[in-house]
Image (spheres, rainbow, N blue to C red):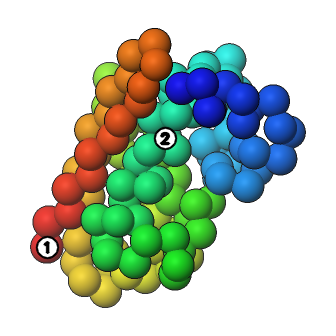
Amino acid sequence: MSRIRKSCKNKRFLSQYFSADEIRFLVKHKLNPALIAENYCVKIAFAKAIGTGMRLIRAQDISVLRDRLGSPFVIAEGNAKILVEREGYTVNVSVDSCREYATASVIINK
């Protein structure tokens, strides 16, 4: 969490790692560091679960939003979307955070 708080001071951080939809969501929630950290963790976990890491997909191509109950879900764009659609993946996401840490689990089913 401390790394995310520090990164948020850099004005380019949000635009480098988050999609426009995510930025709107995060601004709506007053740039809550816990939400930012959770979304960042989902991006890393998604890239690892899909098997490419961040080599073939950009962080902005993975949007992490919340449904009306607050459950996170992923919207893939660009190369990430191509991989998800081509392989017929279903993406399941779980996030959690506390004062010092944020974590995310991404399970991809075919």
Q: Quadrant of the N terminus?
A: top right
Along the viewing direction, whichever of 76 and 53 lies nearer the viewer: 53
Q: Visible in this render: residue 62? A: yes
> Against 100, is 74 above or below?
below
Farthest top residue in view: 99
- Provide the residue designation for mark 2: 39
Q: Is residue 95 left or right of residue 23?
A: left
Farthest right residue in view: 11
Judge the density around disc 1: few (<14), some (14-19), many (≥20) Cα neighbours within 10 Å. Answer: few
Q: Secondary structure at mark 2?
A: helix
Q: Please name the residue shown 72% across and 29% down the image.
A: 6
Q: Please name the residue shown 62% across and 32% down the image.
A: 4
Q: Is residue 96 left or right of residue 108?
A: right
Q: Is residue 88 left or right of residue 96?
A: left
Q: Nearer the viewer, mark 2 or mark 1?
A: 2
Q: Amino acid at mark 2?
A: Asn
Q: Position of residue 52 (x, y in %)?
A: 40, 78
Q: Please name the residue shown 76% across and 50% down the image.
A: 15
Judge the density around disc 2: few (<14), some (14-19), many (≥20) Cα neighbours within 10 Å. Answer: many
> Against 73, is 87 above or below?
below
Q: Amino acid at mark 1?
A: Lys
Measure how far apart labels 2 and 1 are at the Cα level: 23 Å
> Against 3, is 79 above or below?
below
Q: Please name the residue shown 65% across and 53% down the image.
A: 17
- Provide the residue designation for mark 1: 110
Q: Position of residue 110 (x, y in %)?
A: 13, 73
> Against 41, is 49 above or below?
below
Farthest left residue in view: 110
Q: Visible in this render: residue 28? A: no
Q: In the rendered image, which quarter is residue 102 located in?
A: top left
